[in-house]
Amino acid sequence: MPTVILVNEGDGPAADRLDRDTMLGLARIYEGAASPPRLVTFDGRGEIQGADGSSSPSHAAPHMAQSVSLDITIRGSGAPLVLRDRLLPIALSVEVDDIGRESWIEVEAKSHDGRFVPPAARFRVLRKGRSALRLDIRPNSQGDSWTVGEVDVATGQVTPLAPVSSRPPPASIDRLAVIFDRTCPDEGKWGRAWEISLGIGRMPTGGFLAADEEGEGEEIPQAEVNSEIRRTLGPAITRALGEDTPVDCWWFADQGGDGVVCPHTVNMPERPFSEVGAEASGHVDRLVQNLTWAPGLDLWDALDEALNAASIRLVDERENNKAILIVGNSPPTFPREPDTPFFQVRNAMGHSTAVRQKTFCWKEALDRCREARIPIVYLFLTHSAAPFGLERSFDVFRQVQTEVRRALDACGIHVVAEPATEEGLFRGMNTAKRHLMELRDLSAVKVTMV
């Protein structure tokens, strides 16, 4: 088995780049070899990277086999900074108002071809105010790792930031606000929702026979288009949170107007959103049982108004660890901000979709939740069964939904995607609970590109 020793007597960013590029070149040479090399770097300052303290260095652990473009997510305060198709190193600017437990940034990435990428890592930011950082990957015989250094603008000297060894234990959820999307149908009922929204067929009053999506069987009444979601959400929350956590419930939907007319055969809510009430988590089924399905008349719904109202109420509640759970599959009313990620949603079909209104509520609600340290998770319900004869429309719907999820994530909302089924809701609620508890651990560092 060969031993490769890299001697680098330089210092600073150029020396780090030589270390990394040389190590990556060796990894390419020996990739797939039966006897991988032992890799040691000696940096000229008496520091041996990759040795375990003995005379026999460790076997080479997984490395990035070549310089590849990555999708990199950097989390601090506010929305995560998402960089797509980027090559390292990357220059960042961070700002810290106060030094404490929350003064960290977290880095994670994905490669497009499935190659090895170091696991997510956190780094402590120790300088108050604004500073420049340099993000890179450091090759190491025990496995490549992220490295973040503070850059002295005057000299170019890079001082490594210390990694955060572990996260604090997750916090409990003392109060939860649930925001329910009434326009989201059950899995398998998307075709019926499409028909009702366009006023196709008779307005069902329940129980009579008519054509279903395949042309046979019972017609599904409008109120039953989301019956499985309503029936399952309460027990799923009870299983995740127990019986006694206070839960506030809100709903949102859509309304006609501004050039959009609702078919006269369709029952629509009298308002775009509303508060339902509060119950202990063991009785959430009482809150959602009457939130029957209503069609979304265009792409944009009143999620922003419901989130704004729910967050105002939640900030005033006395509990310490509060959180918001959104259940459905709709975006908010199109935000007014010129840099909103929802521009990608608007153009998802290859042309700009209609926007009847624009709102400031969305950003206001998100900012309020960040300032109050209230995490938000969207349990995003998906659909996979294309109705017969509607395959093309369903493909467009799926494409738009993918862009909606990306935009929500870019806004700093953690998205948990699961099928709109009983199994999907139970699984998604467990995942959502875990993320809501983890997201209580929030950073106080603002991250931007240089």
Image (spheres, grey):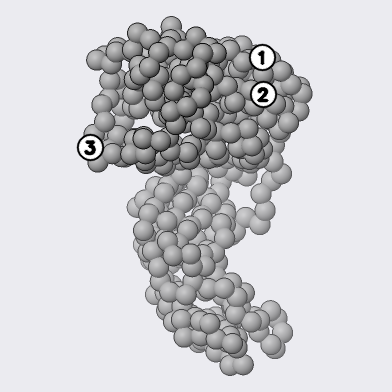
Task: Say which residue appears at 59% left-offset and 87% top-offset.
Answer: 34
Cβ atoms under marks 1 and 2 closer than 8 Å = yes
Q: Which residue is under mark 3?
A: 351
Residue 329, percent across and down?
A: 47, 31
Residue 202, percent across and down?
A: 40, 13
Query: Which picture quadrant has residue 161?
Result: bottom right
**Can residue 226 be seen at all in this image of the molecule?**
yes
Dot 2: few (<14), some (14–19), or many (≥20) neighbours within 10 Å? many
Task: Say which residue appears at 56% left-offset and 46% top-offset.
Answer: 103
Kind of residue at badge 1: Arg
**Vertical position of residue 260 compared to residue 40: above or below:** above
Kind of residue at badge 3: His
Q: Which residue is under mark 2?
A: 234
Callout 1: SS: helix
Dot 1: few (<14), some (14–19), or many (≥20) neighbours within 10 Å? some
- Mark drawn on residue 286: 1
Quarter holding the N terminus is bottom right
